[in-house]
């Protein structure tokens, strides 16, 4: 199991939250995909602002911060 997946499960359990696919509640936990999104999103963006919108536990934010 990926670290992100287990981190998400731990976070949800600690907060007593239960997700439902019926309501479209999903987390992106594929570390390689998150890294790729962060890399592509920050390429040639020396003077640009990146805004991440949406609920979650911060996995994409964590990857984006590695590129600052």
Image (tube, helix red, strand yellow):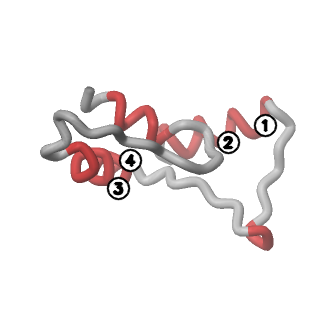
Q: Which residue lies furthest to the left in this view?
A: 44
Q: Label 3: few (<14), some or many (≥20) within 10 Å?
A: few
Q: Which mark is residue 13?
A: 1
The picture places residue 11, in percent across and down from the top left corner, at 69, 34
Q: Nearer the viewer, mark 3 or mark 1?
A: 3
Position of residue 41 relative to residue 59, above or below, is below
The CA span between labels 4 and 3 is 5 Å
In the image, taking residue 58 as reference, residue 65 lies left or right, namely left
The CA span between labels 3 and 2 is 19 Å
**Circles 4 and 3: CB atoms closer than 8 Å:** yes
Residue 66: quadrant of the picture: top left
Tag 4, which secondary structure? Answer: helix
Q: Name the residue under label 2.
A: 9
Q: Of marks 4 and 1, which one's residue comes earlier in the chain?
A: 1
Count of marks, rendered view = 4
**Circles 4 and 2: CB atoms closer than 8 Å:** no
Q: Label 1: few (<14), some or many (≥20) within 10 Å?
A: few
Q: Label 4: few (<14), some or many (≥20) within 10 Å?
A: some
Q: Of marks 3 and 1, which one's residue comes earlier in the chain?
A: 1
**Circles 1 and 2: CB atoms closer than 8 Å:** yes
Name which residue lies at 86% across and 37% down.
Answer: 16
The CA span between labels 4 and 1 is 21 Å
Q: Which mark is residue 33?
A: 3
Q: Which of marks 3 and 2 is in front?
A: 3
Q: Name the residue under label 4.
A: 31
Residue 22: quadrant of the picture: bottom right
């Amino acid at each position: 199991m990926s670290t992100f997946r287990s981190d998400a499960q731990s976070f949800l359990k600690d907060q007593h939250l239960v997700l439902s696919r019926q309501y479209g509640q999903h987390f992106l936990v594929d570390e390689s995909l998150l890294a790729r999104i962060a890399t592509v999103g920050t390429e040639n963006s020396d003077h640009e602002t990146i805004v991440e919108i949406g609920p979650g536990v911060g996995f994409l934010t964590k990857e984006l911060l590695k590129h600052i």
